[in-house]
Image: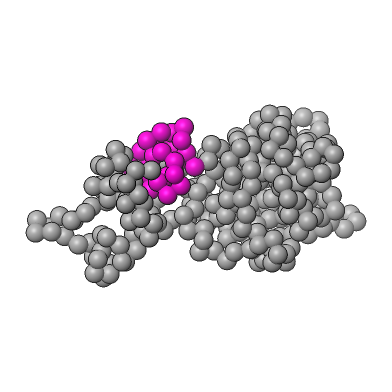
Amino acid sequence: MNTHQLVILTSITALLSISACDSGSDDAGLIADAGSEEDSTGDGDTETGETGEPEDPDSDQDGLTDAQEAELGTDPNKKDTDADNYWDSWELLEGTDPLDKASRIYQGFWPYSPTKNELPQGSWDTSTTEPLSPFPRAEFLDQHGDMVDIYDFNNFTINETGEPSYMIIDMSAQWCGPCHNMAEWISGADTAETASLQQTYPTVRDKVYSLRIWWITVIVEDAGGGPPTLSDAESWYSIHQDNHIPVLVDETQGVRNIYNGGQYPFFFLLDPNMAVEYWGVPGPGDNPFLALWFVEQYL
């Protein structure tokens, strides 16, 4: 990072206020705070010069002024110059190149939330299965080898409803045949093995593919029942080939230890703020995947 970029990075850090990744639209609102460079008086009005024009305009409202974008070589009229789904200012914060689509925050195009630190934060020591308990704030390796901050999925609203997405956490094991069958079904396979799933949960796949629900697979055990590694996520992805589904590695088995429901696959639901919405173990005669049933009935 050169000196100009460092100065620009320092000046935009306080400006970022957006809840979820914008899928390439210039309409999502990154809001400059009342004390930003555009409003040094703090009264909500943009400072203007003698000509009546803003002294330091930000034409695309991405948190970078037009002058800063000129230094960077980015387009002052586009929040996302390289069309990789990440705003130029976000990429500058995360150290990726806003001029190169191949250099992006997540290779899987997962969401990004600059305001994730403002959420109630869970941890491996404090998080529980109780409703409203925040999920641990943690990073996980994904199938592309990126470290993914799971809190980047909070309050994602780029879907047909415009409402924040919920998250199904799919706890699966590499050795588990039913887990792989579930992955085939959610990836769109209609076979004799997946027919009963589609019959029982007829709207869940549509909700996942419309991003009303983020389906996040967390590999909690390898083929021998031990801690999984990157190779488990890579092989899972190579088998099921679904670009909509993040496949994360529970390397420390912290997810397994807190949320284990005694069966695989096991599902629980997080609300848009990363807190437990529903966690339940089925009893005799119950639907075997209660969180999926919850999504089917209520979301």
Question: Which quarter of the rendered picture does the N terminus lie within?
Answer: top left
Q: Quadrant of residue 283?
A: bottom right
Q: Nearer the viewer, residue 147 or 65?
A: 147
User: Could you tell me what secondary structure mostly forms the magenta stretch?
Assistant: loop
Residue shown at 64% from the left, 37% from the top: 143
Residue shown at 61% from the left, 47% from the top: 214
Residue shown at 51% from the left, 61% from the top: 117
x, y percent for residue 34? 31, 66
Q: Is residue 211 magenta?
A: no
- Say whether residue 222 is left or right of residue 12: right
Please state the extent of the stretch shown in magenta in the rendering.
Answer: 76-105
The vertical placement of 120 against 161, above or below, is: below
Q: Nearer the viewer, residue 207 or 11?
A: 11
x, y percent for residue 297? 69, 54
Q: Is residue 99 magenta?
A: yes
The vertical placement of 283 against 34, above or below, is: above
Question: Which quarter of the rendered picture does the C terminus lie within?
Answer: bottom right
x, y percent for residue 64? 31, 50
Q: Is residue 200 visible?
A: no
* Outermost residue to the right: 284
Residue shown at 63% from the left, 63% from the top: 122
Q: Is residue 108 visible?
A: yes
- Say whether residue 216 is left or right of residue 85: right
